Image: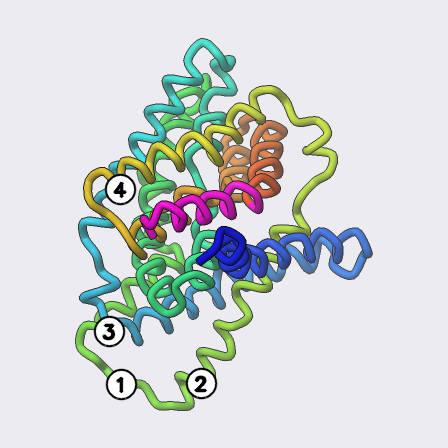
Amino acid sequence: MSLFELFARTLDVTLPVFVMVFLGVGLKRLGWVDDAFINTASALVFKATLPTLIFMSLIQADLGVALNVSLLVFFVIATVGQLALSWLWAWRRVPFVDRGVYIQGAFRGNCGVVGLALAAAMYGSYGLSAGGVLLGVVILTYNTLSVIVLTAFHPERRLSWRPLLLGIARNPLILAVVLAIPFAALSIPLPDWVLTSGEYFASLTLPLALICIGATLSARSLRQGSQAAVGASLLKMVVLPIVSTLAAWLIGFSGRELGLLFLFFASPTAAASFVMVKALGGNTALAANIVAITTLMASLTVTLGIFVLRLLGWI
């Protein structure tokens, strides 16, 4: 296969995902979607269609393939390592009060939408099922570490585990994974009309979520991007995905497992990071800048990353 053909195949994976994001930007500028639509659609995705997509993917999956314990454990260890590297880099380079926002922005990816969409585009049913299981671990890991790091650098906040644990226990995505595992493990059949209806509803998820991501991008945030936001974005989209993916390859991951890990590591900063910063009274401008910059960077960095990994024959 020539380099051109390889690059074209890579674009076949990434372009449909990022076209939907930029379509959201265009629709917002045209006034065809507004803030009320974005808020309603985002809530629908998080509370209903995305959990349905994860559930439908898992009940039809081979858990022996989708439930890869070594991959799940490595992701947690790698995420803690990413936090540690971001923490060390931010030390003495970022003001104390902004350090938690910077660190969270550098390690917390949008795996639930962008990562899962890319995994589905690249690996089909395996990407959705294995990505759905991994997403359960992602939610637990990101939420726990984010609260720790944000409160550690907040002069007036103290770590409270009760609301964190309640939030995780009530998370619709976690509940979808927990509910689906017995169906998949015991091969419990569902009526065809339930499966078909579920697939119709789940199919709304990725295009709707990606359009909402694009519609929430702020040109003002990009124009006002600070040095700290650019630094955190480069860590998130370039340095940490390279280091984490290389570490995964060195310990033996390859093929679609390595590809899935890369897509999750290389996802842009999650919009949920902004929500958490706002709830804790942190620097929301910095958080918004990081989300906007990394989302725009992703179309380039993810495409190049997949191309290089395929060129090397690792995925």
Sequence-wise first label, 1 or 2: 1
Above or below — where is 41 with respect to 142? below
Instruction: Name the side, left or right, on which 149 lies relative to 98.
Output: left
Q: Which mark is drawn over residue 189?
A: 1
Q: Residues within 10 Å of mark 1 (few under 14, many from 20)?
A: few
Residue projecting furthest to the right: 30
Name the residue tied to disc 4. 249
Question: Residue 117's x, y, as percent?
Answer: 48, 59
**What residue sits right under mark 3 in the picture?**
184
What secondary structure is found at the residue carrying circle 4? helix
In the picture of the structure, the residue carrying the numbered disc 2 is: 196
Span of residues in magenta: 299-315
Residues tagged 2 and 3 counted as in contact (Cβ below 8 A) = no
**Which residue is painted at 45% across and 43% down in the image?**
305
Relative to 3, is 184 above or below? below
Asked whether residue 311 is drawn in magenta, I would say yes
